[in-house]
Amino acid sequence: MRAIQFDSFGDPSRVSRCAELPEPDPPQGDEVLVRMLVMSINPADLLTIEGRYGAAIDLPYIPGAEGVGRVEAVGEAVKDLVPGTLVIPLGRGCWRELMLGRRAEVVPLPDGIPVEQAAMLKVNPATARLLLRSIVDAKPGDWVLQNAANSAVGCCLVQTAKSQGIKTLNIIRRANVSESLEAIGADAVIVDDGSDPDRLSAAVREVTSGATIELGIDAIAGPATNAMASALSDRATIANYGLLSGKPCEIDPQHLVFRGLTLRGFWLAAWMRAASSKDLQAMYAELANDVAADRLHTAVEARYPLEDVAEALAHAGRSGRDGKILLTA
Ligand SMILES: NC(=O)c1ccc[n+]([C@@H]2O[C@H](COP(=O)([O-])OP(=O)(O)OC[C@H]3O[C@@H](n4cnc5c(N)ncnc54)[C@H](OP(=O)(O)O)[C@@H]3O)[C@@H](O)[C@H]2O)c1
């Protein structure tokens, strides 16, 4: 079977290759064999291949945090899945044709969910939902401020917040994506590069007429964290969940000491490790229903076959994309 593999850390498009590997053994006991169809490329995959991600791995390694496939065969203990069922694996290493895992490590999906949307369900929709749900108790009518708002997480957050009546104030760095954000439900959009705290807080005050904002969601880090802090209300919380700038979070201690702000992190992988199997299956069932009902949609910019992985990874690493890059098996 074909699988994407890398033997050393480095530039993803240079070190990754499409390798021919032995097929997994037939499933035994509670195992499930999945034939992968579509897999997405996320910033975390690029960080993993560069050797900058939070999880330790052994080389050679098959990357890929998410994708979708159909059940090919099941072990004798698996009674509730039949060949042909569409599933998402919860484990890593998805960029391969055949994936063997335990029954608890796959989530069956409802009929009617578009296959490409299913391939992008595990990471970003879940992250957006948990950022809105688990950091502060955001209620209908509350404002939430986020940066990198046109990212997949950002767009999922806009759609999820809209359906819950929570208002989003969205910071982007390219003016030409503001219409598409408004089209999916963004309440307000600000174009700002996060370099000037006074400029950002003045823009935020103007848009919200000085309303309280208790939650800031930061994917960028570096000076953008400090600019976000300036624009939030006293005692607000910033959840940093990304390192897009490649820099440490900067925050003026004035915000922490005198204004009582909290800066904390969020990592989906840690949440998933701590969650029960019942909670995981329930959250993904909820997200899958939203996708099937078209309440949640992630844009796609391009698709590449596994053999063209170098081109796909170079494309995924470029700024100014208007959607995800997908790999097809
Ligand atoms: N902690 C977690 O559990 C978790 C889970 C999922 C995702 N994430 C993180 O969330 C972030 C977004 O992921 P995604 O998959 O949603 O992204 P994506 O769809 O691939 O989009 C990338 C986004 O990052 C922006 N960007 C790239 N470099 C930037 C920079 N130097 N400064 C400011 N903005 C920059 C892009 O802006 P342009 O369009 O203008 O280029 C775009 O909005 C990533 O950092 C990812 O690692 C974290």
Image (spheres, helix red, strand yellow):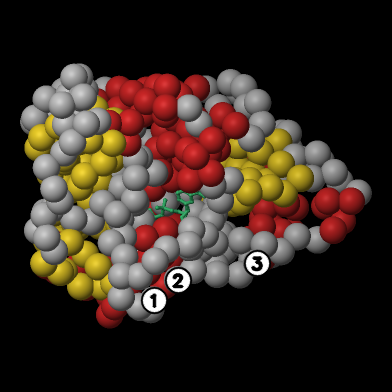
Q: Residues within 10 Å of mark 2 (few under 14, many from 20)?
A: some
What amino acid type is highlighted by mark number 2? Gly
Residue 163's tag is none
What amino acid type is highlighted by mark number 1? Phe
Front one among 245 and 211: 245
The residue that appears at 86% across and 46% down in the rendered structure is 259
Q: Which residue is mark 1?
A: 9
Residue 135 picture location, percent across and down? 64, 35
Front one among 134 and 231: 134
Number of the front mark, 1 or 3: 1
Q: Disc 3, ligand 1: is the CB inside 8 Å?
A: no
What amino acid type is highlighted by mark number 3? Pro
Q: Residues within 10 Å of mark 1 (few under 14, many from 20)?
A: some
Residue 306 picture location, percent across and down? 14, 62
Let me know if residue 199 appears in the view: no
- Mark found first going from the N terminus, 1 or 2: 1
The residue that appears at 56% across and 29% down in the rendered structure is 133
Q: Which residue is mark 2?
A: 51
Q: Are marks 1 and 3 in contact (CB under 8 Å)?
A: no
Residue 223 picture location, percent across and down? 67, 65
Q: Are marks 1 and 2 in contact (CB under 8 Å)?
A: yes
Which quadrant would residue 166 be assigned to in this image? Answer: top right
Q: Quadrant of the C terminus?
A: bottom left
